[in-house]
Image (cartoon, helix red, strand yellow):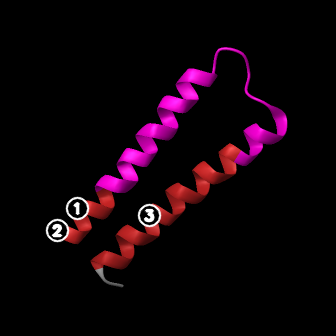
Amino acid sequence: MTRKEGVHSTVRKIDSTMWALTKTLQRFGVPKGLGQPLNKTKNAVGDLVSHLEMTERRS
């Protein structure tokens, strides 16, 4: 496995976990007071994914 495959695999795992969380929250709703922290978490994960992809492209 090359280094690139490892990064893409990690990104796919992170992305699929966030997708599962989003689908669960859509199904059951967001508990009161957690809307803003969840949005911040989603944005942070998106930033992490894009950072990993850009770092890998530079390598």
Q: State the quadrant of the C terminus.
A: bottom left
Counting from the top left corner in percent of width and height, residue 36 is at 56, 22
- Classed neighbour count for the residue bearing mark 1: other residues with Cα under 10 Å, few (<14), some (14–19), many (≥20): few
Query: Residue at horizontal 83%, vertical 35%?
Result: 28
Query: Residue at horizontal 22%, vertical 61%?
Result: 55
Label 2 is placed on what type of residue? Arg
Label 3 is placed on what type of residue? Thr
> Is residue 21 found left or right of 15 in the rendered image?
right
Mark 2 highlights which residue? 58
Marks 2 and 1 in Cβ contact (< 8 Å):
yes
Marks 3 and 2 in Cβ contact (< 8 Å):
no
In magenta segment, residue 57: no
In magenta segment, residue 37: yes
Instruction: Give the prevailing secondary structure in the magenta stretch.
Output: helix
Q: Secondary structure at mark 3?
A: helix
Q: CA distance from mark 2 to mark 1?
A: 5 Å
Counting from the top left corner in percent of width and height, residue 24 is at 76, 43
Residue bounds of the magenta highlight? 23-51
| Label whose residue precedes the other's in the sequence (1 or 3) | 3
Query: Residue at horizontal 63%, vertical 52%?
Result: 19
| Label whose residue precedes the other's in the sequence (3 or 2) | 3
Can you name the residue that lies furthest to the left here? 59
Mark 3 highlights which residue? 10
Q: CA distance from mark 1 to mark 3?
A: 13 Å
- Classed neighbour count for the residue bearing mark 2: other residues with Cα under 10 Å, few (<14), some (14–19), many (≥20): few
> Is residue 37 found left or right of 10 in the rendered image?
right
> Is residue 18 found left or right of 59 in the rendered image?
right
Label 1 is placed on what type of residue? Thr
- Residue 55 shows which numbered tag? 1
Q: Secondary structure at mark 2?
A: helix
